[in-house]
Image (cartoon, rainbow, N blue to C red):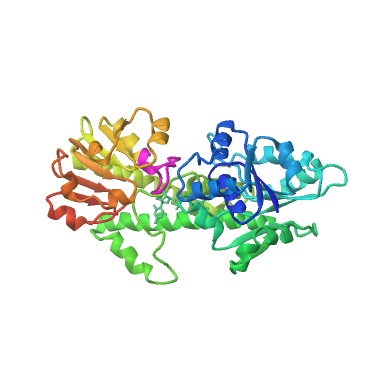
Amino acid sequence: MRIAVFGTGYLGATHAACMAELGHDVLGVDVDQSKLAKLQSGEVPFYEPGLEDVLRRNIAAGRLRFTDSYEEAAAFASVHFIGVGTPQKKGEFAADLKYVDAVVETLAPLITEDSVIFGKSTVPVGTAERLAARASELAKEGVVVELAWNPEFLREGFAVEDTLHPDRLVVGVDRNADGRAEGVAREVYAALLDEEIPFLVTDLATAELVKASANAFLATKISFINAISEVCEAAGADVTQLADAIGYDARIGRRFLNAGIGFGGGCLPKDIRAFMARAGELGADEALTLLREVDSINMRRRTKMVEIAREACGSLLGARVAILGAAFKPDSDDVRDSPALNVAGQIQLQGADVNVYDPKAMENSRALFPTLGYSTSAREACEGADAVLVLTEWKDFRGLQPKDLDTIVRKRVMIDGRNCLEPEQWRAAGWTYRGLGRP
Ligand code: UGA
Protein backbone atom coordinates (compact mmCIF):
# COMPACT_ATOMS: atom_id res chain seq x y z
CA MET A 1 0.00 0.00 0.00
CA ARG A 2 1.05 3.60 -0.42
CA ILE A 3 1.14 5.35 2.92
CA ALA A 4 2.02 8.88 4.06
CA VAL A 5 3.00 9.55 7.68
CA PHE A 6 2.78 13.12 8.95
CA GLY A 7 5.25 14.06 11.68
CA THR A 8 8.68 12.44 11.98
CA GLY A 9 9.30 12.56 15.73
CA TYR A 10 9.53 9.44 17.90
CA LEU A 11 6.08 8.30 16.85
CA GLY A 12 6.00 9.32 13.18
CA ALA A 13 9.56 8.32 12.22
CA THR A 14 9.12 4.92 13.86
CA HIS A 15 5.71 4.37 12.29
CA ALA A 16 6.96 5.38 8.82
CA ALA A 17 10.01 3.10 9.00
CA CYS A 18 8.02 0.18 10.41
CA MET A 19 5.22 0.48 7.82
CA ALA A 20 7.95 0.26 5.14
CA GLU A 21 9.38 -2.76 6.99
CA LEU A 22 5.95 -4.39 6.60
CA GLY A 23 6.38 -3.96 2.84
CA HIS A 24 4.40 -0.77 2.20
CA ASP A 25 5.63 2.21 0.16
CA VAL A 26 5.94 5.03 2.63
CA LEU A 27 6.44 8.78 2.48
CA GLY A 28 7.35 10.55 5.73
CA VAL A 29 6.21 14.18 5.85
CA ASP A 30 7.43 16.95 8.13
CA VAL A 31 7.90 20.72 8.09
CA ASP A 32 11.32 20.49 9.77
CA GLN A 33 13.94 20.46 6.99
CA SER A 34 16.83 19.44 9.21
CA LYS A 35 14.95 16.37 10.49
CA LEU A 36 13.99 15.40 6.95
CA ALA A 37 17.56 15.71 5.71
CA LYS A 38 18.85 13.48 8.51
CA LEU A 39 16.17 10.86 8.03
CA GLN A 40 16.63 10.82 4.26
CA SER A 41 20.34 10.14 4.78
CA GLY A 42 19.48 7.23 7.08
CA GLU A 43 20.18 9.00 10.36
CA VAL A 44 17.65 8.93 13.23
CA PRO A 45 17.56 12.40 14.88
CA PHE A 46 17.06 10.87 18.36
CA TYR A 47 18.27 7.77 20.19
CA GLU A 48 16.05 4.77 19.60
CA PRO A 49 17.67 1.32 19.63
CA GLY A 50 17.14 -0.61 16.38
CA LEU A 51 15.38 2.17 14.48
CA GLU A 52 18.36 3.20 12.38
CA ASP A 53 18.67 -0.32 10.91
CA VAL A 54 15.01 -0.40 9.90
CA LEU A 55 15.25 3.12 8.46
CA ARG A 56 18.37 2.41 6.39
CA ARG A 57 17.18 -0.96 5.16
CA ASN A 58 13.93 0.48 3.85
CA ILE A 59 15.43 3.61 2.32
CA ALA A 60 17.91 1.36 0.49
CA ALA A 61 15.05 -0.89 -0.67
CA GLY A 62 13.31 2.19 -2.11
CA ARG A 63 10.26 1.76 0.10
CA LEU A 64 10.80 4.82 2.28
CA ARG A 65 11.30 8.50 1.44
CA PHE A 66 10.81 11.83 3.17
CA THR A 67 9.39 15.14 1.99
CA ASP A 68 8.05 18.47 3.22
CA SER A 69 5.46 18.58 0.46
CA TYR A 70 1.82 17.93 1.38
CA GLU A 71 0.96 18.08 -2.32
CA GLU A 72 3.34 15.23 -2.98
CA ALA A 73 1.92 13.22 -0.06
CA ALA A 74 -1.68 13.77 -1.18
CA ALA A 75 -0.83 12.66 -4.71
CA PHE A 76 1.24 9.68 -3.54
CA ALA A 77 -0.94 7.98 -0.93
CA SER A 78 -4.57 7.26 -0.12
CA VAL A 79 -3.76 6.11 3.42
CA HIS A 80 -2.47 8.81 5.76
CA PHE A 81 -1.27 8.61 9.35
CA ILE A 82 -1.01 11.60 11.67
CA GLY A 83 1.85 11.26 14.14
CA VAL A 84 2.56 14.86 15.14
CA GLY A 85 2.96 16.04 18.75
CA THR A 86 0.21 17.15 21.13
CA PRO A 87 2.22 18.96 23.83
CA GLN A 88 0.77 20.50 26.97
CA LYS A 89 -0.46 24.05 26.39
CA LYS A 90 1.63 26.73 28.09
CA GLY A 91 0.14 27.59 31.49
CA GLU A 92 -2.71 25.08 31.14
CA PHE A 93 -3.28 21.36 31.59
CA ALA A 94 -4.99 20.93 28.22
CA ALA A 95 -3.29 19.48 25.14
CA ASP A 96 -2.29 21.82 22.33
CA LEU A 97 -3.86 20.48 19.14
CA LYS A 98 -2.47 23.01 16.71
CA TYR A 99 -0.15 20.53 14.94
CA VAL A 100 -2.83 17.84 14.52
CA ASP A 101 -5.33 20.44 13.30
CA ALA A 102 -2.79 21.84 10.84
CA VAL A 103 -2.24 18.43 9.21
CA VAL A 104 -5.97 17.97 8.54
CA GLU A 105 -6.47 21.57 7.42
CA THR A 106 -3.57 21.35 4.96
CA LEU A 107 -3.96 17.78 3.75
CA ALA A 108 -7.74 17.28 3.34
CA PRO A 109 -8.25 19.90 0.55
CA LEU A 110 -5.35 18.45 -1.46
CA ILE A 111 -6.64 14.87 -1.58
CA THR A 112 -7.89 13.80 -5.02
CA GLU A 113 -8.98 10.17 -4.49
CA ASP A 114 -11.04 8.52 -1.73
CA SER A 115 -8.72 8.25 1.27
CA VAL A 116 -8.53 7.37 4.94
CA ILE A 117 -6.67 9.51 7.46
CA PHE A 118 -5.73 7.61 10.64
CA GLY A 119 -4.88 9.75 13.66
CA LYS A 120 -2.20 8.22 15.89
CA SER A 121 -1.33 11.18 18.11
CA THR A 122 -2.70 11.20 21.67
CA VAL A 123 -5.68 13.58 21.67
CA PRO A 124 -8.50 14.57 24.01
CA VAL A 125 -11.72 12.63 23.46
CA GLY A 126 -13.92 14.37 20.90
CA THR A 127 -11.02 15.50 18.71
CA ALA A 128 -11.46 12.73 16.12
CA GLU A 129 -15.16 13.45 15.65
CA ARG A 130 -14.41 17.13 15.15
CA LEU A 131 -11.60 16.42 12.71
CA ALA A 132 -13.67 13.83 10.81
CA ALA A 133 -16.31 16.49 10.16
CA ARG A 134 -13.64 19.02 9.21
CA ALA A 135 -11.93 16.60 6.78
CA SER A 136 -15.25 15.92 4.99
CA GLU A 137 -15.96 19.63 4.85
CA LEU A 138 -12.56 20.41 3.32
CA ALA A 139 -12.55 17.49 0.86
CA LYS A 140 -12.92 18.21 -2.84
CA GLU A 141 -16.33 17.68 -4.36
CA GLY A 142 -16.94 13.95 -4.96
CA VAL A 143 -13.88 12.81 -2.95
CA VAL A 144 -14.45 10.90 0.32
CA VAL A 145 -11.92 11.69 3.03
CA GLU A 146 -12.63 9.48 6.02
CA LEU A 147 -10.97 9.96 9.38
CA ALA A 148 -10.38 7.19 11.92
CA TRP A 149 -8.35 6.95 15.13
CA ASN A 150 -5.63 4.38 15.62
CA PRO A 151 -3.89 5.20 18.92
CA GLU A 152 -0.24 4.28 19.42
CA PHE A 153 1.03 2.48 22.51
CA LEU A 154 4.76 2.31 21.75
CA ARG A 155 7.32 2.89 24.48
CA GLU A 156 10.47 4.88 23.79
CA GLY A 157 13.42 2.51 23.84
CA PHE A 158 11.22 -0.30 22.44
CA ALA A 159 9.59 1.68 19.64
CA VAL A 160 10.36 -0.73 16.79
CA GLU A 161 9.44 -3.85 18.73
CA ASP A 162 6.22 -2.23 19.98
CA THR A 163 5.21 -1.10 16.47
CA LEU A 164 5.92 -4.39 14.72
CA HIS A 165 4.65 -6.59 17.58
CA PRO A 166 2.16 -4.52 19.58
CA ASP A 167 0.05 -5.95 22.43
CA ARG A 168 -3.04 -4.89 20.52
CA LEU A 169 -4.28 -2.73 17.65
CA VAL A 170 -7.17 -0.38 18.26
CA VAL A 171 -9.04 1.39 15.48
CA GLY A 172 -11.81 3.86 16.23
CA VAL A 173 -14.16 4.42 13.29
CA ASP A 174 -17.14 6.60 12.66
CA ARG A 175 -19.88 4.01 13.13
CA ASN A 176 -22.42 6.08 11.18
CA ALA A 177 -20.21 6.61 8.16
CA ASP A 178 -20.36 3.12 6.65
CA GLY A 179 -16.73 3.75 5.73
CA ARG A 180 -13.68 1.83 4.62
CA ALA A 181 -11.40 2.59 7.56
CA GLU A 182 -11.64 -0.82 9.24
CA GLY A 183 -10.91 -2.66 5.98
CA VAL A 184 -8.01 -0.37 5.15
CA ALA A 185 -6.54 -0.82 8.65
CA ARG A 186 -6.81 -4.60 8.27
CA GLU A 187 -4.86 -4.35 5.01
CA VAL A 188 -2.19 -2.04 6.45
CA TYR A 189 -1.66 -4.33 9.45
CA ALA A 190 -2.28 -7.64 7.63
CA ALA A 191 1.11 -9.04 8.68
CA LEU A 192 0.36 -8.25 12.34
CA LEU A 193 -3.12 -9.74 12.15
CA ASP A 194 -1.54 -12.94 10.80
CA GLU A 195 0.35 -13.08 14.10
CA GLU A 196 -3.02 -13.00 15.85
CA ILE A 197 -2.38 -9.67 17.52
CA PRO A 198 -5.74 -8.62 19.01
CA PHE A 199 -7.52 -6.12 16.73
CA LEU A 200 -10.25 -4.06 18.34
CA VAL A 201 -12.64 -1.87 16.37
CA THR A 202 -14.42 0.78 18.42
CA ASP A 203 -16.12 4.11 17.91
CA LEU A 204 -13.94 7.22 17.70
CA ALA A 205 -14.43 8.36 21.30
CA THR A 206 -13.62 4.95 22.75
CA ALA A 207 -10.39 4.69 20.75
CA GLU A 208 -9.27 8.10 22.01
CA LEU A 209 -10.15 7.17 25.58
CA VAL A 210 -8.39 3.79 25.37
CA LYS A 211 -5.13 5.65 24.89
CA ALA A 212 -5.76 8.25 27.59
CA SER A 213 -6.79 5.59 30.10
CA ALA A 214 -3.88 3.27 29.32
CA ASN A 215 -1.40 6.04 30.15
CA ALA A 216 -3.48 7.16 33.15
CA PHE A 217 -3.42 3.60 34.50
CA LEU A 218 0.35 3.29 34.05
CA ALA A 219 0.89 6.63 35.79
CA THR A 220 -1.45 5.55 38.59
CA LYS A 221 0.41 2.28 39.04
CA ILE A 222 3.73 4.11 39.43
CA SER A 223 2.28 6.69 41.79
CA PHE A 224 0.58 3.93 43.78
CA ILE A 225 3.89 2.24 44.52
CA ASN A 226 5.49 5.62 45.20
CA ALA A 227 2.75 6.43 47.73
CA ILE A 228 3.42 3.05 49.37
CA SER A 229 7.09 3.99 49.25
CA GLU A 230 6.32 7.04 51.41
CA VAL A 231 4.63 4.76 53.95
CA CYS A 232 7.62 2.39 53.80
CA GLU A 233 9.91 5.33 54.56
CA ALA A 234 7.80 6.25 57.59
CA ALA A 235 7.60 2.66 58.80
CA GLY A 236 11.14 1.51 58.02
CA ALA A 237 9.96 -1.06 55.47
CA ASP A 238 11.40 -1.94 52.04
CA VAL A 239 9.25 -1.02 49.04
CA THR A 240 11.28 -3.08 46.56
CA GLN A 241 10.65 -6.33 48.48
CA LEU A 242 7.04 -5.29 48.94
CA ALA A 243 6.65 -4.74 45.17
CA ASP A 244 8.18 -8.16 44.45
CA ALA A 245 5.79 -9.78 46.90
CA ILE A 246 2.58 -8.11 45.69
CA GLY A 247 3.74 -8.43 42.09
CA TYR A 248 3.46 -12.23 42.24
CA ASP A 249 -0.31 -11.76 42.37
CA ALA A 250 -1.16 -11.97 38.67
CA ARG A 251 -3.98 -9.48 39.19
CA ILE A 252 -1.42 -6.91 40.33
CA GLY A 253 1.70 -7.87 38.31
CA ARG A 254 5.27 -6.72 39.02
CA ARG A 255 5.73 -4.49 35.95
CA PHE A 256 5.53 -0.70 36.50
CA LEU A 257 5.86 -1.15 40.26
CA ASN A 258 9.36 0.30 40.49
CA ALA A 259 9.34 2.97 43.17
CA GLY A 260 11.79 5.84 42.82
CA ILE A 261 11.80 9.44 41.65
CA GLY A 262 8.73 8.80 39.52
CA PHE A 263 7.59 9.16 35.95
CA GLY A 264 8.49 11.81 33.41
CA GLY A 265 8.89 12.05 29.65
CA GLY A 266 6.87 13.48 26.82
CA CYS A 267 3.79 11.32 27.46
CA LEU A 268 2.59 10.26 30.92
CA PRO A 269 2.80 13.66 32.68
CA LYS A 270 1.13 15.69 29.92
CA ASP A 271 -1.36 12.96 29.07
CA ILE A 272 -2.79 12.68 32.59
CA ARG A 273 -3.10 16.46 32.72
CA ALA A 274 -4.82 16.65 29.33
CA PHE A 275 -7.14 13.84 30.45
CA MET A 276 -8.12 15.80 33.58
CA ALA A 277 -8.64 18.98 31.57
CA ARG A 278 -10.88 17.24 29.04
CA ALA A 279 -12.90 15.46 31.74
CA GLY A 280 -13.46 18.89 33.29
CA GLU A 281 -14.73 20.31 30.02
CA LEU A 282 -17.12 17.37 29.74
CA GLY A 283 -18.36 17.83 33.31
CA ALA A 284 -16.94 14.43 34.34
CA ASP A 285 -13.98 15.76 36.32
CA GLU A 286 -14.92 14.21 39.68
CA ALA A 287 -14.07 10.81 38.26
CA LEU A 288 -10.56 11.96 37.53
CA THR A 289 -9.63 13.88 40.70
CA LEU A 290 -7.65 10.71 41.37
CA LEU A 291 -5.19 11.77 38.68
CA ARG A 292 -4.49 15.05 40.46
CA GLU A 293 -3.24 12.97 43.36
CA VAL A 294 -1.25 10.75 40.98
CA ASP A 295 0.43 13.88 39.64
CA SER A 296 1.23 15.29 43.08
CA ILE A 297 2.58 12.01 44.47
CA ASN A 298 4.82 11.91 41.41
CA MET A 299 6.11 15.46 41.83
CA ARG A 300 6.64 14.92 45.60
CA ARG A 301 9.14 12.15 44.87
CA ARG A 302 11.43 14.65 43.16
CA THR A 303 11.33 16.93 46.20
CA LYS A 304 11.97 13.96 48.48
CA MET A 305 15.07 13.08 46.48
CA VAL A 306 16.42 16.61 46.94
CA GLU A 307 15.72 16.40 50.70
CA ILE A 308 17.59 13.11 50.99
CA ALA A 309 20.55 14.63 49.15
CA ARG A 310 20.50 17.65 51.46
CA GLU A 311 20.37 15.44 54.56
CA ALA A 312 23.22 13.32 53.26
CA CYS A 313 25.43 16.33 52.50
CA GLY A 314 24.53 18.29 55.63
CA SER A 315 23.94 21.34 53.46
CA LEU A 316 23.78 21.55 49.70
CA LEU A 317 25.54 24.91 49.73
CA GLY A 318 29.00 24.28 48.31
CA ALA A 319 28.47 20.51 48.20
CA ARG A 320 29.69 18.60 45.17
CA VAL A 321 26.97 16.33 43.81
CA ALA A 322 27.36 13.76 41.03
CA ILE A 323 24.21 13.04 39.04
CA LEU A 324 24.23 9.80 37.08
CA GLY A 325 21.42 9.84 34.54
CA ALA A 326 19.57 12.69 32.87
CA ALA A 327 17.18 10.95 30.45
CA PHE A 328 13.63 10.36 31.72
CA LYS A 329 14.33 6.63 31.49
CA PRO A 330 17.13 4.36 30.30
CA ASP A 331 17.70 3.59 26.59
CA SER A 332 16.45 7.03 25.64
CA ASP A 333 18.02 10.44 25.05
CA ASP A 334 14.71 12.13 25.83
CA VAL A 335 14.85 14.68 28.65
CA ARG A 336 11.34 16.08 28.35
CA ASP A 337 10.02 16.50 31.90
CA SER A 338 12.85 14.28 33.12
CA PRO A 339 12.71 13.68 36.88
CA ALA A 340 16.51 13.33 36.87
CA LEU A 341 17.17 16.75 35.35
CA ASN A 342 14.49 18.31 37.52
CA VAL A 343 16.26 16.99 40.65
CA ALA A 344 19.66 18.09 39.30
CA GLY A 345 18.30 21.59 38.70
CA GLN A 346 16.76 21.87 42.17
CA ILE A 347 19.98 20.71 43.83
CA GLN A 348 22.02 23.23 41.89
CA LEU A 349 19.61 26.03 42.78
CA GLN A 350 20.22 25.21 46.42
CA GLY A 351 23.89 26.00 45.98
CA ALA A 352 25.50 22.69 45.09
CA ASP A 353 28.12 22.15 42.43
CA VAL A 354 26.34 19.61 40.20
CA ASN A 355 28.00 17.32 37.65
CA VAL A 356 25.72 15.37 35.36
CA TYR A 357 26.58 12.38 33.20
CA ASP A 358 24.23 10.40 30.95
CA PRO A 359 25.26 7.86 28.29
CA LYS A 360 22.98 9.34 25.59
CA ALA A 361 21.17 12.46 26.78
CA MET A 362 24.04 14.92 27.19
CA GLU A 363 23.27 17.08 24.17
CA ASN A 364 19.56 17.35 24.95
CA SER A 365 20.29 18.04 28.63
CA ARG A 366 22.73 20.83 27.79
CA ALA A 367 20.16 22.42 25.50
CA LEU A 368 17.47 22.36 28.23
CA PHE A 369 19.64 23.09 31.30
CA PRO A 370 22.77 24.85 29.99
CA THR A 371 23.86 25.99 33.45
CA LEU A 372 24.34 22.53 34.96
CA GLY A 373 27.85 21.04 35.04
CA TYR A 374 28.38 18.17 32.59
CA SER A 375 31.01 15.42 32.64
CA THR A 376 32.21 13.05 29.96
CA SER A 377 31.96 9.87 32.06
CA ALA A 378 30.40 8.56 35.26
CA ARG A 379 33.83 8.54 36.90
CA GLU A 380 34.50 12.14 35.95
CA ALA A 381 31.10 13.22 37.32
CA CYS A 382 31.92 11.49 40.63
CA GLU A 383 35.33 13.13 41.13
CA GLY A 384 35.42 14.73 44.58
CA ALA A 385 31.68 14.17 45.08
CA ASP A 386 30.07 14.49 48.50
CA ALA A 387 27.16 12.40 47.22
CA VAL A 388 26.49 10.30 44.11
CA LEU A 389 22.87 10.25 42.90
CA VAL A 390 21.70 7.57 40.46
CA LEU A 391 18.63 9.08 38.82
CA THR A 392 18.19 7.02 35.62
CA GLU A 393 18.74 3.28 35.80
CA TRP A 394 21.01 2.84 32.76
CA LYS A 395 22.66 -0.59 32.61
CA ASP A 396 26.08 1.06 33.03
CA PHE A 397 25.00 2.53 36.35
CA ARG A 398 23.29 -0.62 37.60
CA GLY A 399 26.57 -2.39 37.01
CA LEU A 400 28.66 0.11 39.01
CA GLN A 401 30.79 -1.44 41.76
CA PRO A 402 31.92 0.39 44.90
CA LYS A 403 35.54 -0.16 43.86
CA ASP A 404 34.90 1.84 40.65
CA LEU A 405 34.23 4.96 42.72
CA ASP A 406 35.85 4.33 46.14
CA THR A 407 38.93 6.42 45.57
CA ILE A 408 37.34 9.07 43.36
CA VAL A 409 34.63 10.48 45.59
CA ARG A 410 35.21 12.73 48.58
CA LYS A 411 32.50 11.03 50.66
CA ARG A 412 31.15 7.54 50.13
CA VAL A 413 27.48 8.44 49.85
CA MET A 414 25.29 6.69 47.27
CA ILE A 415 21.68 7.81 46.81
CA ASP A 416 19.74 5.50 44.56
CA GLY A 417 16.77 7.35 43.07
CA ARG A 418 15.69 4.31 41.06
CA ASN A 419 16.31 1.56 43.64
CA CYS A 420 18.48 -0.16 41.06
CA LEU A 421 21.58 -0.95 43.15
CA GLU A 422 22.28 -3.61 45.81
CA PRO A 423 22.31 -1.77 49.15
CA GLU A 424 24.32 -4.50 50.91
CA GLN A 425 27.10 -4.38 48.36
CA TRP A 426 27.62 -0.65 48.88
CA ARG A 427 27.26 -0.75 52.64
CA ALA A 428 29.74 -3.63 52.90
CA ALA A 429 32.27 -1.43 51.06
CA GLY A 430 31.86 1.34 53.63
CA TRP A 431 29.36 3.49 51.73
CA THR A 432 26.27 5.16 53.12
CA TYR A 433 23.49 3.88 50.84
CA ARG A 434 20.04 5.49 50.64
CA GLY A 435 17.22 4.36 48.39
CA LEU A 436 13.66 5.63 48.14
CA GLY A 437 11.22 3.71 50.31
CA ARG A 438 13.98 1.50 51.69
CA PRO A 439 15.31 1.43 55.24
C1 UGA B 1 4.55 5.66 27.77
C2 UGA B 1 3.69 4.38 27.76
O1 UGA B 1 4.37 3.37 28.51
C3 UGA B 1 3.49 3.89 26.32
O2 UGA B 1 2.66 2.74 26.32
C4 UGA B 1 2.84 5.02 25.52
O3 UGA B 1 2.63 4.66 24.17
C5 UGA B 1 3.74 6.24 25.56
O4 UGA B 1 3.92 6.65 26.93
C6 UGA B 1 3.07 7.34 24.78
O5 UGA B 1 2.01 7.79 25.18
O6 UGA B 1 3.58 7.69 23.72
P1 UGA B 1 7.17 6.16 27.55
O7 UGA B 1 6.83 7.60 27.74
O8 UGA B 1 8.11 5.76 26.48
O9 UGA B 1 5.83 5.31 27.26
O10 UGA B 1 7.77 5.69 28.93
P2 UGA B 1 7.43 4.59 30.04
O11 UGA B 1 8.21 3.38 29.78
O12 UGA B 1 5.97 4.44 30.22
O13 UGA B 1 8.05 5.29 31.32
C7 UGA B 1 7.52 6.54 31.78
C8 UGA B 1 8.19 6.99 33.04
O14 UGA B 1 7.81 6.18 34.14
C9 UGA B 1 9.72 6.97 33.03
O15 UGA B 1 10.19 8.18 33.58
C10 UGA B 1 10.07 5.79 33.91
O16 UGA B 1 11.31 5.96 34.55
C11 UGA B 1 8.92 5.83 34.90
N1 UGA B 1 8.66 4.54 35.56
C12 UGA B 1 8.28 3.46 34.81
C13 UGA B 1 8.77 4.42 36.94
O17 UGA B 1 9.09 5.39 37.65
N2 UGA B 1 8.50 3.21 37.53
C14 UGA B 1 8.13 2.11 36.81
O18 UGA B 1 7.90 1.04 37.42
C15 UGA B 1 8.03 2.24 35.41
Q: Residue at x 27, y 33 (%)?
A: 354
Q: Residue at x 52, y 57 (%)?
A: 162
Left or right: 180 in relation to 208: right
Q: Residue 420's x, y, as percent?
A: 29, 54
Left or right: 229 in relation to 184: left
Q: Is residue 41 visible?
A: yes
Q: Quadrant of the C terminus?
A: bottom left
Placement of 47 over or under 197, stated as above or below: above
Q: Toward the viewer: 47 or 420? A: 47
Q: Residue 130's x, y, as percent?
A: 72, 46
Q: Residue 148's x, y, as percent?
A: 70, 53
Left or right: 198 in relation to 230: right
Q: Residue at x 38, y 60 (%)?
A: 257
Q: Residue at x 17, y 49 (%)?
A: 402
Q: Quadrant of the N terminus?
A: bottom right
Magenta residues span: 326-341
Q: How many marks?
A: 0
Left or right: 405 in relation to 18: left
The magenta stretch spans residue 189: no
Q: Is residue 29 visible?
A: no
The magenta stretch spans residue 330: yes
Dominant SS type (magenta): loop
Q: Residue furthest top?
A: 371
Q: Residue 372's x, y, as percent?
A: 33, 31
